Every structure is written in structure tokens, then in C-alpha cells.
Amino acid sequence: MKVALYARYSTDNQRDASIVDQFRVCRAFAEKQGWHVVHEYSDHAISGASLLRTGVQALIADALAGRFQLVLAEAMDRLSRDQEDIAGLYKRMAYADVKIVTLSEGEVTHLHVGLKGTMNALFLKDLADKTRRGQRGRVELGKSGGGKTYGYDVVRQFAPNGEPMRGDRSINAKEAEVVRRIFRDYVAGKSPKRIATELNKEGVLAPGGGEWGFSTLNGNAKRGNGILNNEMYIGRMIWNRQRFIKDPDSGKRQARANPESEWIVQEVPDLRILDDDLWNAAKTRQVAIKIKRGDDGREGDNHFRERRRPKYLLSGLTKCACCGGGYSMISADLVGCSTARNKGTCDNRTNIRRDRLEERVLSSDGSGSVQGILRRVHS
């Protein structure tokens, strides 16, 4: 019998050796049964809460192609911990006439899918609840609830019993000065785009170690993210502003705002980087930018959807021939390299009329490839 092996490990105290161990015990079991292992599938450091994994998707595709008759794994929770997903996987394998066998449960049946699927779903919820309880406890002690914030270093230390003490931070003097500079430049009238460009030209690394973008500075005021909205810089830690829900179709997390009554606010004066005057001046400018005055003199909201760059026929399809970044509308008639204008890390300042670009691309003379046109324009 042709058998496929599947192994997975998540990020909770596991490592690559876990994959090797799972394959080893499964291979030994298959040999005892006289089964022939034809392929091995694996997913590294990926949660079992979704089937949107390259390894398990390849497993499904090959099963439907008839490349093996049985799937062997260490346990059902290696295949998936999501009740809906394990049921879907079972249906697909049944359709392909492929059996599922695990070392823990034996041959998987409808009964296993129902009972173990429910147990695994409860495990995930319990794990999430425990994680949030731990995060809240640290926040109420004035410590970080998780994640790294620009301007601070994570303090790694251990309790007398050897257990790691999590959530402590200290101010990073170099990054703190960058934060102060950003706020001073913003208050002085510079746009986030210009500030990001200047930082990139000087080789100052962004929070993720790459290039600065204006969205890194602007963030979202309501959610409290972005350099210009982080109240940690004035010694105030706010936790639970939002929660995340996984989109069942894409597998991506979507943020949902929590009511202010559910926020946990903790004063941490020892982590203050900015004085109140500079912070308040920045907030005042943010409010002023969001207000527009109409021709009749009345004021209204200058919504970001009205300020963002308009779409055009080839939006998302045009790329800079120099850096590979996207082209976007820079005026009513012209498109140009977004990287050159938003980050300042590309030297291509050449523009092209939108109607000319669209006409050349849509023409049938064979010379209308987007990349070719933009190369000729730049040269």
C-alpha cells in the first residue's frame, strides 16, 4: 500500500526536530505494517487552526490525483485543530478513497472527526484564553503584554527559580531620539512622507529593520498604532484596544476595535520618551489635517479615503523598471514610482502620462508591455 506521511509543528515550544521525530515514528510504524512510504508532507512553525498551509494543500492535491491510498500522521491535531477543517479534510480524503490513520487514534472515522474535532477546538479556545489572561496580568503590573515597540528594548531576565520573567522593557536611547525627531519634524510642518524619506536617505532603520514608509508613522489613530499615535511614548500603556479574528476564507487576521470600556490602561512613567507639550502639539496638527474647509467656508472631515491616491485602469499592474516598486497616480494626469516618492529609496523620478501609458499597453502593435514601456520612459 502506498502511504503518505504528514507532520507539523507550531511555534509553541517546538522546533524543526519535532518534524523529524514525527516522520521517524510514522516511518517505523509504516514499515511494521508493510506499507510503502511514497511521500512526506510537512508544515513548519504554522498553526493547526487552518488548512491554508502549503504542506497540507499539497497533500490534498496529491491525494485527489491518486498518488497514494493512505495518510499517516502522529495524531489528528497534527493534521488540523480546527473542527471545520478536519471535517473538510476527512471528506476530501474519503472522496479520493484515501484512508487517514494516526498513531494516536488508529484509523480515523466520522466518530473521531466529531469528538476529537470538538476537543481540539476547545483546546484552541482554552489556549487563547490562557494567553490573554497572562498578557492582562503582565499589563496590570506595568509590563508589556507582548510584541516589540520601537524605542524600547526587551529586558530578558530570569526569576530565582529559573523561569523567564516576561514583559519588562527599557528605553533604547538611539531609537528614542529618532522618535523625538519624528515628532519635532511633524510638529514643524513636515509630512510623514517627507520624514520617512529623510530617515531612509540617512540610513536610519525602520522598526522592522527595513525602510520607513509614511504609514509606519501615521498608523491608525483610533487603534493607537503608528509612531505618531503610540501613547507609550508619554508613559501610558493601553492594552486590548482591538481583537483579531481570522478570516475563514483567506486565513488572514482581521482587526476589530474593542469598546473603550474594555481597554486596560496602565501608567508607566519610567518609559516616557516625549513631554506632554510635544505630544499635544502633534495631536493638534493631526486634528487640523483631518479637517477641510469647503468653498462655502464650512468645515468637514477630510477622510483618508478622499486623500488616498485614486485608482486608474492599470492600478496594481504597473511596476518601476528600476526598483520593481509600484507606480501610482501622482497627479490628475501622471503616474510615477511610489517608492521614489513615498520612501525616497529609488532614483526614478520620471513620470508618464496615464492616458499615454494606457494607450500603449492596450495597443496591438506588440510594443505595449508595461515593463517595456516604463523602461523606455526611464531611459
Image: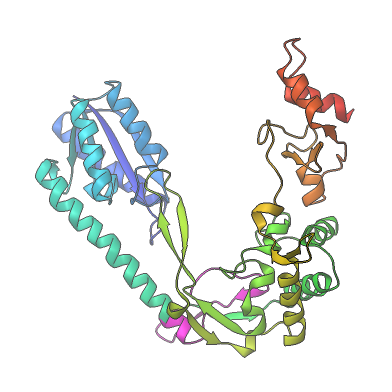
Query: Could you say which quadrant of the image residue 219 lies in?
Result: bottom right
Along the line of sight, which residue is nearer the eye, 217 or 29? 217
Query: Could you say which quadrant of the image residue 365 lies in?
Result: top right
Q: Is the magenta region chiefly helix, strand or loop?
A: loop
| Figure check: 354 above or below 233 | above
Along the line of sight, which residue is nearer the eye, 11 or 150? 150
Q: Residue at x 77, y 81 (%)?
A: 278
- Observer able to see residue 19: yes
State which quarter of the image contains the C terminus. top right
Q: Residue at x 42, y 50 (%)?
A: 16
Along the line of sight, which residue is nearer the eye, 256 or 212? 256
> Residue 273: horizontal and vertical position, in percent?
71, 82
Along the line of sight, which residue is nearer the eye, 104 or 246? 246
Q: Which residues are magenta?
A: 137-165
Query: Could you say which quadrant of the image residue 35 lies in?
Result: top left
Indicate yes or no whether the magenta region holds residue 147.
yes
| Figure check: 350 above or below 259 | above
> Residue 110: horizontal and vertical position, in percent?
11, 42
Q: Is residue 153 left or right of residue 255?
A: right
State which quarter of the image contains the N terminus. top left
Q: Is residue 10 left or right of residue 346?
A: left
Q: Residue at x 85, y 69 (%)?
A: 189
> Residue 14: horizontal and vertical position, in percent?
38, 57
Q: Residue at x 77, y 51 (%)?
A: 342
> Residue 343: horizontal and vertical position, in percent?
78, 52
Q: How is the image coloured?
A: rainbow
Q: Is residue 56 left or right of residue 216?
A: left
Q: Is residue 122 left or right of residue 333?
A: left
